[in-house]
Amino acid sequence: MAIKNVFRSRRVIGIAIAAALVAGVTGCSAGTSTSSKSTILNVGGQADNLTRVFNPYLPDTAYSLGSAPSAGKGGMIYESLVQINYVKVGSDIPWLAKSWKWASDNKSITLNLQSGVKWSDGKAFSADDVVFSYELMKKFPALDTLGVNFDTITAKDPNTVVITFASPSEQDFTTLVSLAIVPQHVWSKVKDPTTYQDPNPVGTGPFTLSTFSPQSYLLTKNKNYWQAGKPAIDGLRFIAYKDNQAQANALVQGQIDWAGAYIANAKDTYLSKNKAFNYWAPDVGQDGLIPNNDVFPFKGDPAVKQAISLAVDRQQIADSRSSHPATSQIGLPMPAFTDAIAPEYKGLNFKQDKAAAVKTLEADGWTKNSGGYYEKGGKELAFSITFPSAYTDIAAPAQVIVSQLKDVGIKVSLDGVAVTDINKLTSTGKFETTIGYPVDSAPTVYSFYNNIMNPAFYKPIGTETPTFQNIQRYQNPEAAKLLADYPLAATDDARAKIIAQLEGIWIKDLPMVTLFYWGYYGDWSTAKATGFPDESNPYFAPNPNVVVATRIVPAGK
């Protein structure tokens, strides 16, 4: 999303654009290019008031419209060491790092870098650039929205980097290697990277910035790109749209060649319009109702969350956004993590039971008032759902939740906010519930539970959680100990035992109420290019990202 996506990553990094700006770009039809022979794909995204900011470490910028390297997305200009594969879990792709090896105690990792890599200005790329980029995160913590934790980093030689850790850290690999690498020879001259706009970015990626306007920007092929013969296409034009619906309309009208947009009823509204149109959204994460456990009615009262979980019809909620309903009560997206279900929880799936929901509330001391809603201690059982009103894929299930919970005496209201406001509100705990978890999908079982329920990331309301982990401010000493013990476990059996205990805590406490699974939306036309991933060839996520951009080829070739 939630994700949460992602980043409608599920990091809800996005921005909405003024209607006037949309009008200014809708005249750009798919197929527009810099010359009659070049292949330029129009890529859709959500953005507002685009300014020429390409600093890869800042949110809500032109770069985050679709080219930032985070969780398998983007990386068109600045690249990361490894591309994490969320569709084929465990099949991560070597990128700027061609190989890596952990020490036997998992307290250090040695990364061997690609040779012959150049920055787009022709300067040589080396281990010094990697060291510089990671040390920026220590020197300027505000830039570290990924949560890259390490002890030391050194350049063993121009093509080798060694990173050390205070404790075993292999479980943090997917986060560690996703950092955008920037050129030391450029950024070392920047006085304050936290405010640096980077209007003329110099990267190692397959594309470079060509032209820019408040409505769109054009990336063209990097002549110095280190992957021989790639990219096969000539460029990508990123175009901003005000919301999901505006972007979907442009897709249907053939004005966009590639996007990561949610389309309601895609078969009828999009796929049927043109045989070249394609849509695929492989499930990679879970989402649902995310409570703020530090506020009424959730603080110290898990029965409320249990009642909500029993009361809702997950199929109906999922149908409202063309998703799959959540099944297993351990929270992880299925069927991708079926093997992770502990034996004692296999077959323990969600089931709607309104009578049980009512019984749970009344056993917890709630009684119905004259208005038909439950109350306790003179306070009505009511809360709001805060979410970006521009995101139709969140608005739809939120409306269904309001109706379903009203049936069991729980009052819910909708609090629609600007896309640019949601990250600040959730990171500082200024919400009652939300939908759209702002941390990306779960590449491992540990990362899922660590990101969402680790009390180590707890911050009091008003204090920002920069990595967006545990935004619901969940606290449980037992969970904290298990998550701290996991990296120290020496055997697979020991790790499996810890995961089973975490699953039990999740089922009992419901750090969040899982409702549906979400995917990396991919919408594309094969009129100008082919080679996109799909169900028959699921090599990577289908949303705009550097892996796909370097594999697609002009149509007919």
Image (cartoon, grey):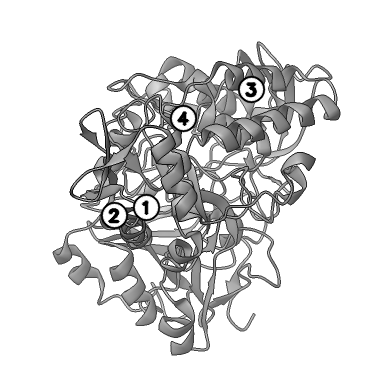
> In the image, what residue type sits under mark 2?
Ala
Discs 2, 1 touching: Cβ within 8 Å = yes
Q: Please, is residue 203 above or below residue 468 in the view?
A: below
Q: Position of residue 90 (x, y in %)?
A: 74, 46
At 32% from the left edge and 49% from the top edge, which residue is drawn?
62
> In the image, what residue type sits under mark 1?
Leu
Task: From the viewer's perspective, tell me whether residue 238 is left or right of residue 9.
Answer: left
Q: Quadrant of residue 177?
A: top right
Q: Secondary structure at mark 4?
A: loop
Q: Quadrant of residue 186?
A: top left
Q: Please, is residue 367 above or below residue 253 in the view?
A: above
- Cα distance between the residues tagged 3 and 4: 13 Å
Discs 1, 3 touching: Cβ within 8 Å = no
At 73% from the left edge and 44% from the top edge, which residue is drawn?
341
Residue 65: mark: 1
- Cα distance between the residues tagged 3 and 2: 37 Å
Residue 483: mark: 3
Q: Decide which of tag 1 and tag 3 comes sooner along the chain.
A: 1
The residue at which mark 4 appears reads as 470
Q: Nearer the viewer, residue 384 or 421?
A: 384
- Cα distance between the residues tagged 2 and 1: 6 Å
Mark 4 closeness class: few <14, some 14–19, many ≥20 residues within 10 Å: many
> In the image, what residue type sits under mark 3?
Leu
Q: Nearer the viewer, residue 323 or 374?
A: 374
Q: Decide which of tag 4 and tag 2 comes sooner along the chain.
A: 2
Task: From the viewer's perspective, tell me whether residue 343 is left or right of residue 42.
Answer: right
Q: Please identify, in this view, whether the residue under mark 1 or under mark 3 is nearer the observer.
A: 3
Q: Nearer the viewer, residue 336 or 252?
A: 336
Residue 47: mark: 2
